[in-house]
Each structure stands twice: as structure tokens, then as C-alpha cells.
Amino acid sequence: MGEINALDSRVEQAVERYNLANVKLRRIGHDLERARFDLRVARANLKRAQKSLAEQAVAVYTSSDSNSTLEVLFGASSLDDLLNRLDTVSRVSDQRSSLLTAVTRFRVQIGRETVRLQDAQAEQRDVVAQRAAERASIESQLRQRHRLLSSVRGEIAHLQAVERARSLQLAHSYRPQPQQSSSGTVVGVSASTPEASVAPPSRYGGVVGIAMRYLGTPYVWGGASPSGFDCSGFVMYVYSQVGVSLPHSTYAVYGMGVPVSRDQLQAGDLVFFDGLGHMGIYIGGGSFIHAPHTGDVVKVSSMTGWYASTYVGARRIL
């Protein structure tokens, strides 16, 4: 089972990298929308400024006999050339100078917004590729996990079959002795015990009380609803019930709130493990509630053993 546990850790880290890529994509999407809007505004402003400047140029031509102005108008080979020539004419009015400045400013803005848009699009392509790679990694590792579990189940079934055969053989070879006592029968005792002792959910309040409502909900990678959660999706959903918006990513959440030392943990604090590959909600008494990994459900665990050895830190959001 050690190999399966190690695989679960790798899968969950890949899931959280995938979740982080989704958070980045949403941020890039907002950046793209803003850049496109700013670019449209700058182009519209430039168009208006150029139109006004052209009207000014016509006014110069129709209202002046100055040879210098005519040379500017007829000697220009393009609008850009005209703008440069007009800029040097001493008779350009203050209004015309203002239009020239505006045209220059809007052209610079268009160049800047175009570069910003191109950068955002390039980043978007990179993050999409990263997300696709993480998704492929997750699916590949989940298939490996399934094969390992099948192998373990097969091995267990084989051992059980061997034990049954041995028991049958012993039963067939057994010959009871006359008047043999039948006392001393051993009654089997179930070895199943809960991972952590948990008080009834009604004993908890606030964020922890809400989290307790979802005990037993299955783990689903990428999940963030009562139909299935991954670790950060579970925390995000629970906190949303008290009006707090958190990103669906352990890496992103770890940068929020304030840090809390382990000896100062309070119920509702967020605890992080395994290089930020896993997180949960502290409930007090050295335990936390979380969505562990594929094949498991939302449950309460003690911050001992593997969780103690991979503990990263805690953040207080509320």
C-alpha cells in the first residue's frame, strides 16, 4: 500500500497544479478582456483625433495663402508625413498642437496595448499547454493507481483462497475425540476503527460546522460541489457558504490571509501539507477535515503520522 499512498500524493499534487493553471487562465481571461477593451478605445480615440486633425489641415488650406502651408499640404506623401510637416509649421494653432499630441499619445497607447494583448495571448497558450499536460499526467497516474489496486485486490483474493483451502484441508483431516469439550470458542472482534474520533456535527459551528455537513462526500479531482470535492475545491466551497471567495488552488490560497503557527491553530484555520499538494480545515484537538484523494471521501484525520511529517503551515482567513 506504500506505493499507492505515494502515488496518491503525486496525483493530488498534479491535481493542484491543474487547479492553479485554471486560476491563472481565469486571470489571463480578465487581462485579455481589459486589453482588448483598452485597445478598442485607443483606436477609436485615434480615429477621432486624426479626423479632427484632417479637418484642421483643410481649414489651413482654405483660409490661408501662405506658401509655406501649401508646401506642407501638397508636399506630404502620406498622413504621417503630413503630421510631421504640420508639426513644424509655425502657424499651427494651439488647438492643432493639442490634436497632434493626442494622435501621438493614442498611437503609443495602441502599441502598448497591442504588446500587452500579445503577451497575454502567449501566456494563455503556455498555461493551456501546462494544464493539458497536468491533466494527462493525472489520468495516467489514476490508471496506474487502478492497476495497483487491482493487483493488490488480486493478491488479497489469492491469499484468502489459499487460507480457505488450508482451512478445508484441516477440517477434512480433523477427527474429533470422544467427549471433547466444546468450550473456549473464540468470538471474532472487528478491527475496524475510525481514523479520528469525531464529535457529532451539531457540536461544531461556523466554517467547521458547515464542513461537517459534507462528511462522506466522495473525492472527485477538480470537484468543487457536494457531488464531489478535491481538497481545495472542498475548502473553496465551504468558505463560499460564509461569503468568502477563495481560489480553487492550494498554491493560490496559501498566499491569502495571515500565517498561523501550529501551536496557535484555531477551528476554521486552513492547514497545508505535502509541499502545498494538500489542504484541509482545522477543527481543533489536533484534527482537520479534508477531501483526501481518489477513492476516499471527506473525513476527519489526525495531524499525526504522514500529515505531521509533511506539514507545511497554516493560514487564517476569517
Image (spheres, rainbow, N blue to C red):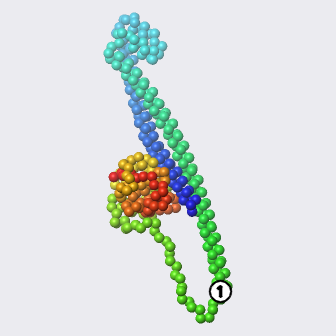
Query: What residue is rendered at 38% in x and 67% in y?
Result: 199
Residue 194 shows up from this direction? yes
Looking at the image, which residue sits at the far bottom? 179
Q: Which of 178 and 209 is in front in this view?
A: 178
Q: Nearer the viewer, residue 10 or 125?
A: 10
Query: What residue is rendered at 63% in x and 90% in y?
Result: 176
User: What amino acid type should be assigned to the residue bearing mark 1?
Assistant: Tyr
Q: In which quarter of the image is residue 39?
A: top left
Residue 270 shows up from this direction? no
Query: What residue is rendered at 38% in x and 53% in y?
Result: 261
Query: Does 45 sit above or below residue 310?
Result: above
**In the visual, does 98 lie left or right of 108?**
left
Q: Position of residue 304 (x, y in %)?
A: 45, 61
Q: Position of residue 97 (x, y in %)?
A: 35, 16
Residue holding disc 1: 174
Q: Position of residue 107 (x, y in %)?
A: 42, 24
